[in-house]
Amino acid sequence: MADHGEADGVGFDENRMAQPTLRFRGPAPPPTPVMRGPPPLLRPPPPPFGLMRGPPPPPAPALRTAAL
């Protein structure tokens, strides 16, 4: 049991030394308004989605007769 306790003590020491690094590395300072663009919703969608606006085109009659 003593060995197990020592191993836990070493583990806790390692965690204590590793936590500050994780704590400082995690939260990054917010980017300046100039660097980050407008919010994602206000930005126009990528080309494939931008071209898909509007009602879908009517199905081609040739494909309809081929399906029937």
Image: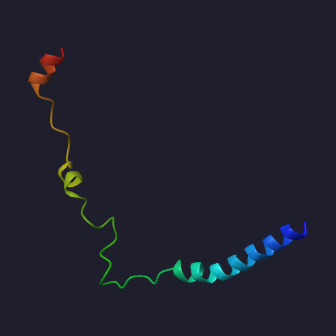
At which x and y percent is residue 21?
A: 58, 82
At which x and y percent is residue 52?
A: 20, 48
Name the image quarter holding residue 9.
bottom right
Is 33 positioned to the left or the right of 55 in the image?
right
Q: Residue furthest top?
A: 68
Q: Residue at x 46, y 84 (%)?
A: 29
Q: Residue at x 20, y 55 (%)?
A: 50
Is 64 positioned to the left or the right of 12 in the image?
left
**Is 47 or 15 nearer to us in this picture?**
15
Q: Residue furthest left?
A: 62
Q: How is the image coloured?
A: rainbow
Is 66 positioned to the left or the right of 26 in the image?
left
User: Is residue 62 shown above or below 28?
Assistant: above
At which x and y percent is residue 32?
A: 36, 85
Count of picture labels: 0
- Say which quadrant the C terminus sits in: top left
At which x and y percent is residue 48?
A: 21, 52
Q: Residue furthest front?
A: 3
User: Is residue 17 shown above or below 64?
Assistant: below
User: Is residue 21 shown above or below 48?
Assistant: below
Name the image quarter holding residue 30.
bottom left
- Say which quadrant the N terminus sits in: bottom right
Q: Residue at x 70, y 80 (%)?
A: 16
Q: Residue furthest right?
A: 1
